[in-house]
């Protein structure tokens, strides 16, 4: 049963959003089965579909894959978005881990109390502009190429674009000191598969609102 | 320049321990430069040696690799501990990521305040015995092989052994309900490279002692 990959998650971004991005950028059509209430998650658990009782879970190539990074690494490998050799893969892994750390901080915000949230927004802004974005700006400056690694589109580029857009939602002028990242963002947004994903009606999810956060808390008991 | 990988981290387990384990299991000799005070970390930062201003950092094959997962993936790929194809890699990655979640809990246990330790240990053991260990017991049961994936040693086996041994340090009967994991542990511990790493005098680090905790925290803050 060749079929399209099938994503199991809530309707929100959460940990599944990077997977949606990567599949979309790779030009891979996928289906989604949404967890709307606690019972939906329980059913997946009781079915034995979730190796560690957690989502994201993606049905792909006869496997029920779990663990976000495992899923992303598999998709990247399958669709030639993971570099040409071990060293390129090492660079892609390093870059992706950086953007993962940054996006992880942003993802946690809706679940934090107002005063903690405010402090963390300031921290995220600082980290983005002093720890993370300078690294990617420098990488692009040093080799002068369009993509981060190996002069070819990779998972690192897609993940960086996602991180840039997510950070801009928090602070719209976050790239003001990073001209090469601004150009990178423009270029990447015009890659046909990505351009399609950025248009209304795609499977890209909007930032969560209060109601959906409340539902997520109920589903996952957090 | 000996050509051996050089590990930069404090003289403690932390996030570098998985890297020490994997290099040792692969039979790769390595050197270590221990961060002993804040200034040591500062120096690495000012040198431009740390891509994201953080350790672990491993000098290997002309690169200064950072980010634990990137380092482990590179070592596993280089020394054939990452499966033979994409699907085996997918299984290895799933297992390793699950274990990494458990490891996050275990790693911070020693740093918990005294009044939280008991509850924390109960949480760790609950997750270990109900969510993680059963998965690996079942994997071994289902295929009956010695190793988790592809009938061959991989970084998943090394990570599982590392976590099992640390769990047993916290609670000696952690494997009581898992006979196949008990024999897995014995088999793995007898693999020559691993046996050597488990002996006194190796690069394997002991559990951090309470008196050393303030010093480690001071390096990072």
Image (tube, rainbow, N blue to C red):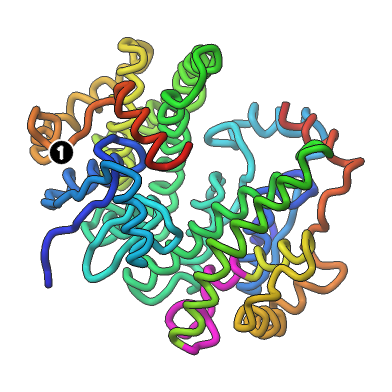
Q: Nearer the viewer, residue A212 or B162?
A: A212
Instruction: For label 1, count other residues whose C-alpha is less than 10 Å away and answer few (under 14), some (14-19) or many (20+).
Output: some
Q: Quadrant of residue A186?
A: top left
Q: Is residue B62 visible?
A: no
Residue under the image location 36 percent in, 67 percent down: A48
Residue under the image location 51 percent in, 81 percent down: B140
Dot 1 falls on a residue whose secondary structure is loop
Residue under the image location 14 percent in, 51 percent down: A31
Residue range (magenta): B144-160
Q: Quadrant of the N terminus of chain A?
A: bottom left
Majority SS type along the magenta span: loop
Q: Nearer the viewer, residue A106 or A27?
A: A106
Eyeballing the image, is A203 above or below A41? above
Q: State the image coordinates of residue A96 (x, y, percent, origin top left).
A: 40, 42
Q: Is residue A119 left or right of residue B118?
A: left
Q: State the image coordinates of residue B196 (x, y, percent, origin top left).
A: 77, 77
Eyeballing the image, is A135 above or below B75? above
User: What residue sits right under mark 1 in the picture?
Assistant: A203
């Amino acid at each position: 049963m060749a079929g399209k990959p099938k994503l199991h998650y809530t309707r929100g971004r959460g940990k599944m959003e990077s997977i949606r991005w990567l599949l979309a950028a790779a030009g891979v059509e996928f289906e989604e089965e949404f967890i709307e209430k606690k019972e939906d998650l329980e059913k997946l658990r009781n079915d034995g579909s979730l190796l560690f009782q957690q989502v994201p879970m993606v049905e792909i190539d006869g496997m029920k894959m779990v663990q976000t990074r495992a899923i992303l690494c598999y998709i990247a490998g399958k669709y030639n978005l993971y570099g040409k050799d071990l060293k390129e893969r090492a660079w892609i892994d390093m870059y992706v881990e950086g953007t993962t750390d940054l996006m992880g901080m942003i993802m946690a915000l809706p679940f934090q109390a107002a005063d903690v949230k405010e402090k963390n927004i300031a921290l995220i802004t600082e980290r983005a502009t002093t720890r993370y974005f300078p690294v990617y700006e420098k990488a692009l400056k040093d080799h002068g190429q369009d993509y981060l690694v190996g002069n070819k589109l990779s998972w690192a580029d897609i993940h960086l674009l996602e991180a840039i857009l997510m950070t801009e939602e928090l602070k719209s002028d976050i790239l003001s000191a990073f001209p090469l990242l601004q150009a990178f963002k423009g270029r990447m947004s015009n890659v046909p598969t990505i351009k399609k994903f950025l248009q209304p009606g795609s499977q890209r999810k909007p930032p969560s609102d209060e109601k959906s956060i409340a539902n997520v808390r109920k589903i996952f008991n957090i | 320049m000996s050509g051996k990988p050089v590990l930069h981290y404090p003289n403690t387990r932390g996030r570098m321990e998985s890297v020490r384990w994997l290099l040792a299991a692969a039979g790769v000799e390595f050197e270590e430069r221990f961060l002993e005070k804040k200034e040591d970390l500062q120096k690495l930062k000012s040198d431009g040696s740390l891509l994201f201003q953080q350790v672990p950092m491993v000098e290997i094959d002309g690169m200064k690799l950072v980010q634990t997962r990137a380092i482990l993936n590179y070592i596993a790929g280089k020394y054939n501990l990452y499966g033979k194809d994409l699907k085996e890699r997918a299984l290895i990655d799933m297992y390793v990521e699950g274990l990494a979640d458990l490891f996050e809990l275990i790693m911070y246990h020693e740093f918990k305040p005294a009044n939280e330790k008991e509850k924390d240990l109960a949480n760790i053991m609950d997750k270990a015995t109900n969510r993680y260990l059963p998965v690996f017991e079942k994997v071994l049961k289902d295929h009956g092989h010695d190793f988790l994936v592809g009938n061959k040693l991989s970084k998943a086996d090394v990570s599982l052994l590392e976590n099992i041994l640390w769990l047993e340090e916290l609670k000696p009967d952690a494997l009581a309900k898992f006979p196949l994991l008990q024999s897995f542990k014995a088999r793995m511990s007898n693999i020559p490279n691993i046996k050597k790493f488990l002996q006194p005098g190796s690069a394997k680090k002991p559990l951090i002692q309470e008196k050393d905790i303030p010093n480690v925290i001071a390096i990072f803050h």
